[in-house]
Image (cartoon, rainbow, N blue to C red):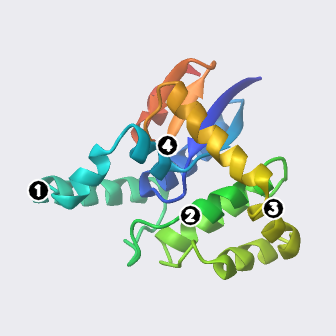
């Protein structure tokens, strides 16, 4: 079975769109998703600081079009995106938490809940209680989850994934790799990924 490595951070609306896109694509094609949670802020700080500069002085015409484009994609993916009051968000705990769910049947439900909590409902996913509400609904042990969030394993795994993406030429979220070296960046590249699958 072919596999697609998926480097993602829930703090990006385009990643939410890509999440739905890759899940839908897997229903049509036979492949495995290898989940690679990252901290995209670490990438911006290290190799892509222009993202922050663009946020300080956005081109208004481009910003308006970007919002329209995002809503067009949201309709296509059947997602409701409401721009949250807190942006950018500290997604460290949420992304460490996604590592806790890797290997469990509920990884996709966890990610969907985190994405929807932030991008649809405007909840603060940096808050532990928000995440614990998700964990409890998924039937997982909240204490085990909290212990994992503060573990060296969780911290190092997130750092390792983030560094791995940069080492392989990546610069943001979402990023996909097919066959280890064939990289695709962005929600709108899933059609190309589909073609090459």
Instruction: Give the secondary structure at mark 4.
Output: loop
Q: Are marks 1 and 3 in contact (CB under 8 Å)?
A: no
Whether residue 112 is visible here, answered yes or no, is no
Q: Earlier in the sequence, mark 2 or mark 1?
A: 1
Q: Alpha-carbon neighbours of circle 2 within 10 Å: few (<14), some, or many (≥20)?
A: many
Q: Are marks 2 and 3 in contact (CB under 8 Å)?
A: no
- Report the residue marked by disc 1: 61
Q: Are marks 2 and 1 in contact (CB under 8 Å)?
A: no
3D distance between C-alphas at marks 2 and 3:
20 Å
3D distance between C-alphas at marks 3 and 4:
24 Å
- The residue at the point 80 percent across, 77 percent down is 136
Q: Nearer the viewer, residue 22 or 147?
A: 147
- Report the residue marked by disc 4: 174
Q: Position of residue 38 (x, y in %)?
A: 59, 47
Q: Earlier in the sequence, mark 1 or mark 3?
A: 1
- Report the residue marked by disc 2: 115
């Amino acid at each position: 079975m072919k596999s697609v490595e998926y480097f993602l951070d829930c703090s990006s609306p385009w990643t939410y769109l890509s999440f739905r896109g890759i899940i839908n694509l897997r229903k049509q094609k036979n492949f495995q998703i290898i989940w690679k949670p990252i901290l995209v802020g670490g990438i911006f700080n290290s190799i892509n600081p222009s993202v922050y500069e663009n946020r300080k002085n956005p081109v208004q015409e481009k910003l308006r079009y970007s919002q329209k484009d995002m809503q067009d994609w949201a309709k296509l993916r059947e997602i409701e995106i409401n721009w949250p009051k807190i942006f950018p968000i500290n997604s460290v705990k949420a992304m460490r938490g996604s590592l806790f769910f890797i290997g469990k049947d509920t990884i996709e439900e966890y990610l969907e809940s985190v994405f929807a909590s932030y991008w649809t409902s405007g909840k603060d996913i940096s808050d532990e209680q928000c995440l614990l509400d998700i964990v409890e609904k998924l039937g997982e042990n909240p204490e085990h989850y909290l212990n994992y969030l503060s573990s060296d394993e969780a911290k190092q795994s997130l750092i390792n994934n983030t560094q791995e993406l940069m080492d392989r030429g990546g610069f943001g979220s979402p990023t996909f790799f097919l066959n280890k070296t064939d990289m695709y960046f962005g929600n709108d590249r899933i059609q190309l990924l589909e073609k090459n699958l």
